[in-house]
Image (cartoon, rainbow, N blue to C red):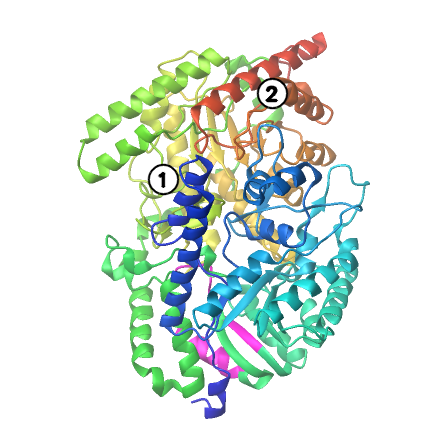
Amino acid sequence: MTSKSAAAAARATVYGYPRQGPDRELKKAVEGYWKGRVTADALHRTAVELRAATWRDLAAAGLHEVPTGDFSYYDHLLDTSVMVGAIPARHRAALAADPLDGYFAMARGTQDVAPLEMTKWFDTNYHYLVPELGPDTVFAADPAKQLGELQEALALGLAARPVLVGPVTYLLLAKPAPGAPPGFDPLTLLDRLLPVYAEVLAALRAAGAEWVQLDEPALVQDRTPAELNAAARAYRDLGSLTNRPKLLVASYFDRLGEALPVLAKAPVDGLALDFTGPAAANLDDLAAAGGLPGKRLVAGVVDGRNVWINDLTASLATLATLLGLAGHVDVAASSSLLHVPLDAGAERDIDPRIARWLAFARQKTTEIVTLARGLGHGTAAIAAELAVNRADLASRADSALTRDPAVRARTAAVTPADARRSLPYPERTVAQRARLGLPPLPTTTIGSFPQTTELRTARADLRAGRIDADTYERRVETEIREVVAFQEKAGLDVLVHGEPERDDMVAYFAERLTGYLATRHGWVQSYGTRYVRPPVLAGDVSRPEPMTVRWTTHAQSLTARPVKGMLTGPVTMLAWSFVRDDQPRAETARQVALALRDEVADLEAAGTAVIQVDEPALRETLPLRAATRPGYLAWATEAFRLTTGGVRPDTQIHTHMCYAEFGDVLQAIDDLDADVISLEAARSHMRVADELAGAGYPREVGPGVYDIHSPRVPAADELAALLRRALAAVPAERLWVNPDCGLKTRAWPEVRASLEHLVTAARTIREELPDSSSSSSSSS
């Protein structure tokens, strides 16, 4: 039992919360604004109502302090760029003319102006807008958003803590602006940025903020002495301000390591640390650093990124230990709850035996409040909750729902030979080129085509019983015919069936594999207004029957050109699901890989000559600390090869990755042993082509030339210019032409025009090639 003196310290809080509302009201309002159906005032009212509802719910659940500033119309890094005045020159006029439209132009671009680059937020599936900074960047404080949201919460009578991205993380995540000198490091702008943060902090204090949270997750990564010194300088300067609120510096997703003593010694008032997963090492590290005497510690003991219930007894033990290491200990989730769905209680179709194991944002909030009460008032105060929690944990540990002996026997029988192609790439490519007969710079797409209102309506009608399966399948077949006909007319070389039967690239397969559960309301923000429903992986995985063969073979029957079979790879199936935490991920990945291997075999047997196995999450799931990366990459690349290793030499295997820092996984990309890889490259100006060339990547590459996350239609000459840049790094005989990513989120008019321009650009560049490059000769 904890002492009564702990009660004052045992406050409950969170760092952030899902933004969208219970029925994705924010998504609908923002997209309505883009389409002209919702006014700016109506959008603002929706946002105010959603924020107020969230804060009231959190307070009613028992939180002692609610976060503000974590809400966003699109992205919190973009909000930070606006807050510090880091507006690229190409967007300044739009932002000055209309701040809201200018904000969305930075996120999405316009027909005339390219958006900011987008990439993954650490090892999550959330995407942020990358700040563009250069030596001429002039920062200027604009705290209007942060002040407005703080004042809204205070007006409701709530204790509120503004949450800002910290200055060090902001600069470490930024990239040099176009035209910046080679080697420019945005971190050199720190002394220029800190006065702006000081101004924002002073404004928040004047508005009534007692505490402000500064998030510094970039410090959990391996950092150089210079970067650690920059962090020490930043928090020495900010902590020494006289006109400031109390400062809480937060980190999450991994251990702070060498950055922990830097922050512990800084003149700030508290730290918020993650104590889950690999970040559990923060406990020993904090003790070694001498703790936080006289300071506040916010302990993230409830995992903010998974959907499994917390072990309350274990978390209480951690919290009890922490009481001796800090002046005050509060309880929180390990990170923002942005990364989990809103409410498991809304799910009515999940087996009740499994539902008791699940905790979404609302349930995690309840766990946090329970732990704070137990820490402050002793375990007797939460005896009933502890008894229920122990029973739920035991039911999962003993459940036959999670284990399939046949699946486990199959994975145990895997040999290294199962994860190898029968011939090396130089020999395979000769057979593939003879079979496919493609021109130089072959054109293709990544897989999906626009999901029309008619398609979504048909899917909804099927689920509601308004149409039968035959009617729905005829609708899908009609869509495939239209997609194939368009691709042939546009002149694409390798076609796709367009994936009209799929509402999501992971959920579609999860619904057809054992071990997975689908949710109805489990939406999580991926980027902007793009929300996904990650399936829940609760048990062992197998494939009862073919999942894609019917649609791929139907498409192939409509054309003489090759049609790609389209699958989602095993690592992405894990990364974009809420994966089980009761066995090593490597074991789960192997199960998924073997299930997908069966699908690959059936596609090949049906005559499919090109099979794409997408792995956009390979880089996303890369551990944040270098020491743990080799083990992850070993099982991740093996899982891909296990999926594809059984095909014939003349079957061409493609893979796809997008919106990540590919330079960190170049060797792993090679280790996949795919024949062709397509990669996002348009927003990053073909940087990945140079990275692959520098690493000596020997296989075929399709660096994307069409940014599908923007509504703008690129001109043919713009695409041709990107291809010329790619050709400077990749030989013509190994270069493919394709968009950055799938097209499902785009509208048909933009897609038609953009793909027609893409084919025109490819033909233009083919005509520029020397005669020796016009053959289909094997690469050296």
Residue 679: x and y in percent read: 58, 33
Residue 641: x and y in percent read: 51, 38
* Mark 2 vs 1, N-terminal side: 1
What numbered label is drawn on residue 509? 1
In the rendered image, which residue does mark 2 sit on? 715
Judged left or right of residue 64, residue 254 is right
Q: Which residues are magenta?
A: 297-322
Residue at image location 34% in from the left, 61% down from the top: 358
The answer to whether residue 576 shows anywhere in this view is no
Q: Mark 1 belongs to which amino acid? A: Phe
Residue toward you, 559 or 764: 764
**Is 417 situated above or below 112?**
below
Residue at image location 66% in from the left, 72% down from the top: 244
Judged left or right of residue 235, residue 145 is left
How dense is the environment of label 2, judged by Cα within 10 Å: few (below 14), some, or many (20 and up)?
A: some
Residue at image location 31% in from the left, 42% down from the top: 511
Residue 725: x and y in percent read: 71, 25
Residue 423: x and y in percent read: 56, 27
Image quarter in which the C terminus is found: top right
Displayed quadrant of residue 760:
top right
Image quarter in which the N terminus is found: bottom left
Q: Is residue 674 magenta?
A: no
Displayed quadrant of residue 594:
top left
Judged left or right of residue 266, residue 320 is left
**Is 105 situated above or below 127?**
above
Q: Secondary structure at mark 2?
A: loop
